[in-house]
Image: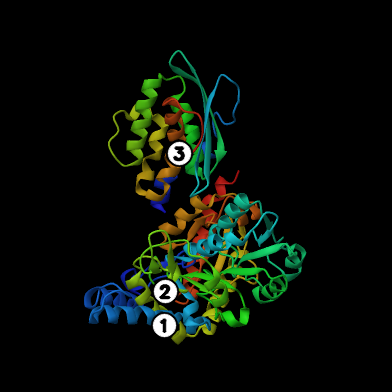
Amino acid sequence: MRYYDDFPVIKNNPDLVYLDSGASSLKLQSVIDKMNEYYTKYGVNVHRGVYQLSYIASDEYEETREVVAKFLNAKTKEIVFTSGATSALNLVARSLSEHINEGDEIITSVLEHHSSVMPYQEICKNKGAKLIYVPLDKKGNLTVENFKKVLTDKTKVVALTLMSNVLGNTTPIKEITKLAHEKNAIVVADGAQAVPHMKIDVKDLDVDYLAFSAHKMLGPTGLGVLYGKYKELNSLNPIEFGGDMNDNVELYDSTFKEAPYKFEAGTPKIAEVIAFKEAIKYLEKQDLNKIYEHDYELTQYAINKLKAIDGVEVYATESSCGIVSFNIKGIHPHDASTIYDEKGIALRAGHHCAQLITKWLGVTGTLRASIYLYNDYSDIDKLIEATVVACEYFKEWII
Amino acid sequence: MSSMNELYRQVIVEHFKNPRNKGLKNTDEYTKLRLKNPSCGDDVTIEVKIKDHHIEEIHHEGTGCSICCSSASVMSEVVKGKDIEEVQEVIEDFYNLIKGEDVTDEERLDEAMAFGGVAQFPARMKCAILAWKALGTILAGKSGEEDV
């Protein structure tokens, strides 16, 4: 009940067991209120109007950039707002592609979400570059040792997730970044799953780029963030052209603003950006370190309980935080998920937009329970109860 | 669990465990179409041998959930030996059943009527109709591979 007033979806669905925050977290009342405040009190465009309301909107918008920057230990001008982690990752990849040549190598892994690997598949196909996968160890972990095996003088970009959205294991990105920089490679980190659960300090990790989504961390949908080390970020060319990102426009050529503005063409997600700072303030108030501890404990509790059930296969590893992937042996995850739905438990079933890792696991898909700060032990107990019922129900099906 | 039993009726479970007409012949006599639902991974291939405007033989192969797999099996039995135009009507009727709408001929749908419970599970409708959609696409003159 601790979060009853903070999350209206919990208030409106008191029996809901929400275990799908890896797909999208619940949204804060304060975020919704802030969006409403924008729409009802000063709902005009930013960076354009020379009148009072536009100044308020612009200040509120830019204040979020400051809040996000502080949250990541970055500079304000290193924060670009995008329409999501996917568009942030595509922006970096497409902008970097100018610097990729035939024979260059791009390192990634099978742990990646499709949006962290597919943009580089396209670049490699178009440029004759090579996509290289870091081999995973037996448990599905990405290790520094294995990274060393694929890092070469030809490596130009290293695109890796900070936390797998299927296994929940984290990448030793700091060590990997140090090694990659010794080869002058650019490191692009996908933080969509990690940033909601753990304190990220971009200066400490030293990654060149970091992408994440607002809606997975209590914020509004349709908004993502791209952090870029300023020197790197400002050296990239934009991929979208038009309003607000331009400087001087002539008949046949134009100049652009400096980063981050040259990457924010057109009217941005004003209400979403303005409201997102409320989510970050809330996470900071709750303390990211405590959130990590809470999510990690619940995850391990769920993994251990599920492992103890005969007929359940658990794919997550000991290092998993917030993500529990499993299957009822011999039963397609979509069949199993119907039982959970019946019992008011929301979880994900399928390949989770990460087909490479489900193929690596040798399955067509998995069930995935994902945990966040508003979950408690009773949620996990209900998941376990439903799993026992599901195993019993499907027992006669196993061929 | 009552609505679970409404969804997974005995016929469906039985066809899932013992699928009929499973396995492709892959000969020139057959027209073949593979239909996939990339968002869930269901993947069905249907092949039919048409003779004298009738479905003489039909086979299916693929991977997916029980609803998808058993639906392909049930369909193969329901349409086998029927006139093509009649099969097209049966397919339309099956779509109506899945949408929870009235069907014109319940007897003709036969065991496929067991899928009536799917109407209460919107997330599973695509699973139930995948094989039928593949057959309908073949009868519309197409072959090869498609995504829904």
Q: Residue A102's x, y, as percent?
A: 67, 54
Residue A391 shown left or right of residue A274 in the figure: right
Amino acid at circle 2: Leu
Whole-angstrom CA distance, mark 1 to mark 2, is 9 Å
**Residue depicted at 60% across the width and 25% down the height:** B25
Picture quadrant of residue A116: bottom right
Residue found at the very far front of the displayed protein: A251
**Amino acid carrying mark 1 in the image:** Tyr
Q: Which mark identifies residue A218?
A: 2
Element marked by disc 2: loop
Seen from the viewer's position, the closer of residues A177 and A99 is A99
Residue A102 or residue B46, whichever sits in front: A102
Task: Tell me where residue A379 appears, x and y as whole percent.
Answer: 47, 71
Q: Secondary structure at mark 3?
A: helix
Question: Disc 1 marks which residue?
Answer: A282
Write down the quadrant of residue B24 in the picture: top right
Q: Residues within 10 Å of mark 1 (few under 14, many from 20)?
A: some
Pointer 3 residue: B130
Classify mark 2: residues with Cα within 10 Å, few (<14), some (14-19) or many (20+).
many
Q: Amino acid at mark 3?
A: Leu
Rendered position, B140 above or below A111: above
- Left or right: A257 with respect to A155? left
Q: Is residue A135 left or right of residue B7?
A: right
How far apart marks 3 and 1 lie (CA) works out to: 45 Å
Instruction: Report the Cα–Cα distance between label 3 and label 2.
Output: 36 Å
Task: Measuring from the top left, give residue A188's x and y in whole percent.
Answer: 59, 68
Front residue of A343 and A67? A67
| Residue A238 appears in the picture as rendered | yes
Q: Nearer the viewer, residue A352 or A224?
A: A224
